Amino acid sequence: MDGDILVAHWKTLEEKARRMAEAIWASPCVPEQIAGVRVDGVIKLRENHYVVIEVSKNYSLDKTRTDIAKINSVRNALFAKGIYVEAYFLTDGQPPASSKATAEASSIKILSLDEFGAKFLGSSEYQFLRKKKAFGSAVSPRSGDPDTGRYAEIRYLDGDEKKYSVTDISNALKNRSQVVLVGEFGSGKSRCIKEIFEMLAKEDSVFTPIAINLRDNWGLKSKSIIFRNHLEDLGLGKFADSLIRSSGDGNHPILLDGFDEIGSQSWSGEAARLSEIRKQSLVGVRDVVQSSSRAGILITGREHYFGSDKEMIDSLGLRDDAIVLRCPAEFTEQEAKDYLQLNSSLSILPDWMPRKPLICQLLSQLDDEQLAKLEEKNSGEVQFFESIVDAVCEREIRIHSSLDADTVKRILLKLAQDSRYQHRNNESISVAQLNEAFFSVTGYSPVDDSSVLLQRLPYLGRLSSESTDRVFIDDYAKNGLRGLAVVQSQLNRDPHVPKSNWKQPLDIFGLRVWSENLEPGQQALNYAKECESSGNSQFVADYVAARLLGEEETCDFDGLMVNNSHIVDLRMAGKTITKLIIQSTVIEKITHEECEVSDVWINDCLITDFYGVSENRKLPDYFRDDCSVQVFNHTLNTSKISELDLNDAQKTLLVIIKKLFFQHGAGRKEEALLRGAESYWDRRIAQRIITFMISEKIVSRIKGDQGHVYVPQRRHTRRMGAIVELRRSSKDPIWDMVSSA
């Protein structure tokens, strides 16, 4: 350092020491000249009791002796006036033992600034103990233990779409800005707090940041009580007075996690009343903020908790210039890859997987065997989603333990299923519906503690700023929950479902959830017939679509009728279908390849996309003339492949890829790969292709009841799709192999 920098550094140390002293002794600490000697800091506790502090960056023995002589001259001068002097010599670094011994011989305490902070503010103890505790919901969703995964850098956005990193937020806090970070559940708010705590604590080991989980402070109405409760929980209650004073002076950045978790609230359906209830429940948080106005403050909570940003700023007691940031709902593709590479052995991100931080965290905690199954099996997505729902519900009850996880899950399933009574563009969940769902599941009405959980149920958000109604904000989760709800209804033969007037169909993911859990047999079919006769035709439509998604090659519907309903995706390809009637129904998508039917009639239906019909656009005979098709999509089916300007080896490869990777099912029997491609099937090259795919772990071969079954490894779906799309332009080794055959 040059001379000017040295002086500036020394003055910063001096100022820091005085700020610490004022927090410790609750009195002004000012430089003063006593008996002709300038003292860096003097605290006049009483008329006859002073504390004097000398600060130095040089703690050599010679410098120590010089400063001791200076302090002793001050002490003697004051003693002559009947004033007792408590003396401290503070150093920038750790003083050597020789200096300590010399100072102690003169009854002067020589300490580094870190030691001074640890002795009176508990700085080092606080950092050590706080890091051992969970930061809000930054925990393992499965075990509840503090999250130890590695952090993947993401950006947080303000209202102008300006991006902030954790470093940017940390710098804002050091400049004593007030920052609010909002986001949906599982979007990484608590993990952001953890990263910022560690960053700030590393930069300043004396004025450590104070990180408080607000959910541990229910009903507490003042900063003093909240701080004392927090420190007592860490076993550091003896430092409460000095830390409260020090934080009031703005010395410590304050990190408050979970404004939506702070208090017991009455349950009201009136927007104005609910706003006032929220404000009253946050009186303690508001006192922390307003009593620490000189400090940098970061506070987090769920985005849809308040009716508006204005209400949030007012309820939290923040300044008008507070920075409002939002967590992105999902990682970007690159952020998700970075996170999983840091925290798991997953090689490829599944295409279907939502990029939410919580879901990536759950994925990263699977062992290698579970990850392999997830990548390879068709059912991996559904099984993983079910585990996500269970983990999310467990996570919620760790925040509020008024209910058990299964009860939370059943409430969500009830709400998801009830949302099907409404049209898609008019969905909402009122307070009355929340209460009814709670009562339906538990048998009693929600009390205050339970109402807090209802207000912050995962997957739900505010319908609008002026409404108390909620709405599902995550379509993927909503449709997965609807699928699980139907599974439970069918398995339990719920007596209410057959009479229900559902207006919304299951989407493709909801259908997959049901399909993977739909046991073939007469019981499920009988329940569908009960729904048909009682008026819930939408259940019947979903049952047909879900069953056709399954592994059954022959589906006998025993005369079942779908009438006046809505089907999102009807996959008839490769199936033998008997005794089914579909009429007066909207079908968004039909896939019709290599399908055999008997006693099947599809009448008066509006079909949006029809896949698999030849160029002349003539529908099969069992589609009656009153069916209307908006778009014919000529997919590259087995028949179309025969017309391509390719050799037989290349055509054989395309058929194998299409049947294994782009037709629903867990795998294909050997004879099924050949079916429909007899005119150009090259048996020799087909065997070479299969052998190559097995060696490259693109497919696996298992022994079935009637010969070998080939199972696609789903992590290669994108690669196989590129071969089908590019064909002659493909540079893939497997295409090169068949092209040179």
Image (spheres, rainbow, N blue to C red):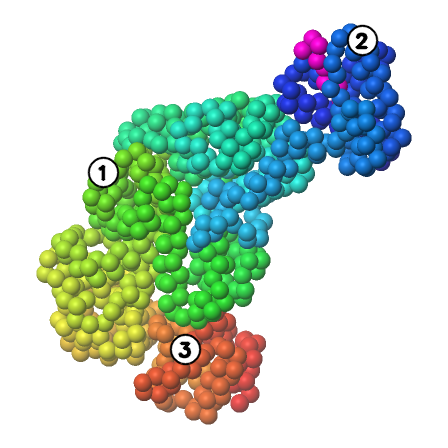
- Mark identifier at residue 662: none
- Tell me if I can see residue 375 in this picture: no
Q: Which residue is mark 2?
A: 80
- Mark identifier at residue 445: 1
Residue 341 located left or right of residue 631: right
Nearer the observer: mark 3 or 2; the answer is 2
Q: Residues within 10 Å of mark 2 (few under 14, many from 20)?
A: few
The one nearer the camera, 107 or 293, is 107
Looking at marks 3 and 1 on the same chain, the residue that comes earlier in the sequence is marked by: 1
Residue 457 located left or right of residue 731: left
The one nearer the camera, 557 or 283, is 283
Question: Could you say whether the residue bearing mark 2 is in a helix, strand or loop?
Answer: loop
Nearer the observer: mark 3 or 1; the answer is 1
Going 26% across and 37% down the picture, which residue do you hit? 446
Question: Could you say whether the residue bearing mark 1 is in a helix, strand or loop?
Answer: loop
- Mark identifier at residue 711: 3
Going 51% across and 44% down the picture, which residue do you hit? 134
What residue range appears in magenta? 46-53
Place residue 91 in its image quadrant: top right
Q: Residue type at mark 1?
A: Ser
Marks 2 & 1, CB-CB < 8 Å contact: no
**Badge count:** 3
Looking at marks 3 and 2 on the same chain, the residue that comes earlier in the sequence is marked by: 2
- Tell me if I can see residue 556 in this picture: yes
Residue 503 located left or right of residue 225: left
The extreme left residue here reads 533
Q: Residues within 10 Å of mark 3 (few under 14, many from 20)?
A: many
Q: Is residue 12 magenta?
A: no
Per the model, the C-alpha gap separating discs 3 and 1 is 50 Å
Residue 613 in picture, x, y percent from top left: 30, 74
